């Protein structure tokens, strides 16, 4: 579904990402981990078009994405969440989900008022489903700014799902969550995958990553240093060195695709 080949992003002399090869198969929950500054969020920003690549290619479902703006990639089926919550604070929970609708029917209804008053029964049913997914059914009329932190995290997850993505990029969705909230997030991620959405998960909470992913790639200093199942990655010496802060893993990128 997603293929990155030789993907690089340089900011002046800083190589935030350098020659990344990665393949995410349809139906996977794929983990992307690494220490702070390793290139994880840069990878997401390149996939969804926030950054332009210095070198390399991004293919999604066989189509070259290079040069295409974020809204075109969203229409193609790529949605995301953010490390820092980016809701519409002065809209209600229901409105945050409505504005994210990405069906062909929604797109064809031009203008704010026609879309608002022309919301179909199907759209309203879908929003009700998303409210239930986020455990926010009782908060539909609440302003997003009035939600607790964990509720805002759940709303952002649901809002990304409202775009009906084929690929969902989750950028540290467990940040600031309690253990119970993380367990619930894991169940939501699996539920999304079971509904037909492929997941790319960037996360520092290892309990979540190891509990939901089938395959993991590890970045360090902009390079891929390991790839495998959760168990294989846990046992990899380069990964252990990267997380312990030693220098041995800095110079050992992994060749080939994930």
Image (tube, rainbow, N blue to C red):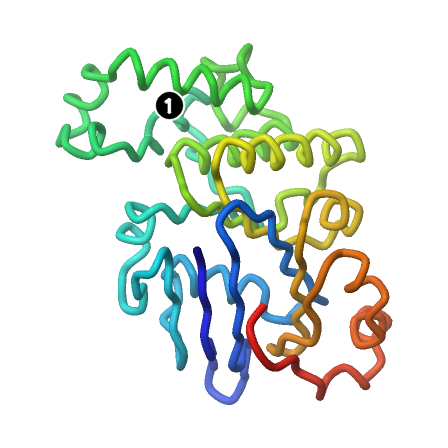
Tell me where residue 237 appears, x and y as whole percent.
85, 75
Element marked by disc 1: helix
Quarter of the image for residue 57 reads bottom left
Quarter of the image for residue 45 reads bottom left
* Residue 256 vertical placement versus 227 (above, below): below
Tell me where residue 89 appears, x and y as whole percent.
45, 31
Image quadrant holding the N terminus, namely bottom left
Q: Which residue is drawn at 40% across and 81% down?
A: 55
Image quadrant holding the C terminus, namely bottom right
* Residue 117 vertical placement versus 34 (above, below): above
Q: In the drawing, does residue 53 fall left or right of residue 22?
A: left
Q: In the drawing, does residue 145 fall left or right of residue 150?
A: left
Q: How many marks?
A: 1
Q: Nearer the viewer, residue 111 or 69?
A: 69
Q: In the drawing, does residue 127 fall left or right of residue 23?
A: left
Tell me if mark 1 has few (under 14), some (14-19) or many (20+) residues whose alpha carbon lies within 10 angstroms of its own.
Answer: some
Tell me where residue 129 appears, x and y as whole percent.
47, 18
Quarter of the image for residue 113 reads top left
Q: Which of 158 and 143 is in front in this view?
A: 158
Query: Mark 1 = which residue?
Result: 95
Q: Residue at x 66, y 34 (%)?
A: 185
* Residue 229 vertical placement versus 179 (above, below): below
Tell me where residue 141 appears, x and y as whole percent.
45, 13
Q: Residue at x 46, y 69 (%)?
A: 4
């Amino acid at each position: 579904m997603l293929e990155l080949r030789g993907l690089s992003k340089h900011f002046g002399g800083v190589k935030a990402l350098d020659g990344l090869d990665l393949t995410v198969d349809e139906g996977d929950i794929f983990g992307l981990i690494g220490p702070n500054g390793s290139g994880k969020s840069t990878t997401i920003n390149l996939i969804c078009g926030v950054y332009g690549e210095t070198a390399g290619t991004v293919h999604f479902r066989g189509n070259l994405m290079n040069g295409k703006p974020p809204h075109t990639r969203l229409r193609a089926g790529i949605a995301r969440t953010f490390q820092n919550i980016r809701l519409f604070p002065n809209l209600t929970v229901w409105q945050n989900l409505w504005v994210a609708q990405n069906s062909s029917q929604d797109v064809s209804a031009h203008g704010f008022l026609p879309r608002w008053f022309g919301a179909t029964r199907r759209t309203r049913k879908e929003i009700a489903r998303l409210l239930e997914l986020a455990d926010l059914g009782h908060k539909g009329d609440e302003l997003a700014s009035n939600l607790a932190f964990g509720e805002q995290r759940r709303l952002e997850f649901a809002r990304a799902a409202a775009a009906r993505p084929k690929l969902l990029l989750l950028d540290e969705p467990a940040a600031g969550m309690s253990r119970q909230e993380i367990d619930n997030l894991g169940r939501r991620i699996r539920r999304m995958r079971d509904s037909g959405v492929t997941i790319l998960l960037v996360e520092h909470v290892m309990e979540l990553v190891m509990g939901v992913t089938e395959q993991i790639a590890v970045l360090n200093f902009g390079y891929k240093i390991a790839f495998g199942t959760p168990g294989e990655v846990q046992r990899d010496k380069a990964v252990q060195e990267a997380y312990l802060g030693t220098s041995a893993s800095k110079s050992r990128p992994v060749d080939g695709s994930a």
